[in-house]
Image (cartoon, helix red, strand yellow):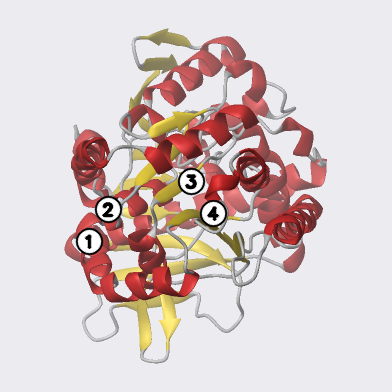
Amino acid sequence: MIIAANRAPVRRTDDGWAPSIGGLATALLPVLEEEGGVWLAMKEDDGIPERLEYPSGDPSLTVLRIRLSDQELHNYYSGMANRVLWPISHYMIQHLELDPAFMEDYRSINARFARAIVDEYTPGDYIWIQDYHLMLAPQLVRSDLADATIAHFWHIPWPAMEVFRVLPWARELMAGMLGSDLIGFHVEEYVKNFLESARVLLGAEVEGTTIYWKGREIRVEAHPIGIGVERFRRMSAEAAEEAERLREELGSEYLVLGVDRLDYTKGVLSRLLAFERFLEEHPEYHRRVVFYQIATPSRTDVETYQKLKRDVDEVVGRINGAFAVDDWVPVHYRYRTYTQEELCIFYRAADVGLITPLRDGMNLVTQEFIAANERGMLVLSELTGAAYLLQEALQVNPYDLRALTDVLKEALEMPEEEKQTRRAKLKKRVGELDVHRWAERFLSSFAA
């Protein structure tokens, strides 16, 4: 197995190298360790070796890093990935920065990844390319390895064709992905959008979920990803006492929780405005409810993210300035990174998980909350891929401030029996989506 992804699956610790924390590494490192193979990722830090045998005592796989200059990193990652492909995929075209230099270095880095894949390849290997950072790589590899088995998995939403075609390089990027034999997305909506993009933008023939392009067949399938469910259940049980202590410290009857990267797609600002309106309209909840928003710093070098932080800071200050009384502070805002063990304390303590992105894919925070929580209810944006699968959550249009305000009250006042029924069904579904099962399902289709 040869896996190519933006990030490496291992991290340096005081005790040496350890698996990275995250779904992809959790799912695929065991596969590589069992089957043997190579994981290719970008190299950002000069102190990290370009080639690492892992695990150190009895290596079964190689982590190979592709070196990028500071300028290449800026154009390829901060530029093309985060200022072009990220906003277009989330329907945020107002954030697009269509700098040709971004695409130029994106081509160059994709070619570098493709060359490394070809150099590491031996006949019979499976090649699995990950996400929007490497759209061109499949076709570049295909041009050298005509008979190789290549798959691509896209981890974020694929937008409607009319949106994606806004990009000047839309057709080139699509053609790059069609070097694959199998392309995976999280949900059927993204599959349909991709098929339509291939048909309209490239003139490809589409039958069912198969694309016929330049004499080849490309299967396009939905494979929703999950989390390491048992790990979160275990961490939640270990966090039970800390969760109760947190509730006592906050001193309120209800805890509403938001957990996000501070990204303009996540809807943090709109949910704060909804909570402000909730307090204005429902004074009976004053002193009884606390909103705890965790916002992990993200892409801090990008101006739109800097502006978002300023706006969020301002609204948090306004709400607390207007409503705080004595020892009751309605909004607790934490702009910092927490470990997954620490997050489980918040998940376990919460009465409402308020996960309302303006647009998102699977949003694994939703599944983490469901796996770890034993008392509350999930409020979920209907504009996420997760909404197709987590039907028992209270779903809401995150652009509708009135609806956000009302659904928060509904979640707080839901009868206990209904909450338990919904929560049991959500937990069952999250168990079925487990990240290890995701890897097994995709790899089975890969090998078919």
Task: Give me the disc on residue 354.
Answer: 3
For mark 1, what is the residue? Answer: 233
Above or below, 232 relative to 129: below
For mark 2, what is the residue? Answer: 371
Q: Residues within 10 Å of mark 4 (few under 14, many from 20)?
A: many
**Residue 91 in view here:** yes
Which sits earlier in the primary sequence, circle 2 or circle 4? 4
Above or below, 310 relative to 328: above
User: Could you give the CA–CA distance between mark 3 and mark 2, rounded to whole angstroms?
Assistant: 15 Å
For mark 4, what is the residue? Answer: 260
Label 2–label 1 contact, CB within 8 A: yes
Question: Percent position (x, y) of residue 151?
Answer: 36, 38
User: Could you give the CA–CA distance between mark 3 and mark 4, rounded to whole angstroms?
Assistant: 10 Å
Q: What residue type is labelled 4?
A: Asp
Residue 52, quarter of the rendered image? bottom left
Q: In which quarter of the image is the N terminus?
A: bottom left
Which sits earlier in the primary sequence, circle 1 or circle 3? 1
Label 1–label 3 contact, CB within 8 A: no
Q: Residues within 10 Å of mark 2 (few under 14, many from 20)?
A: many
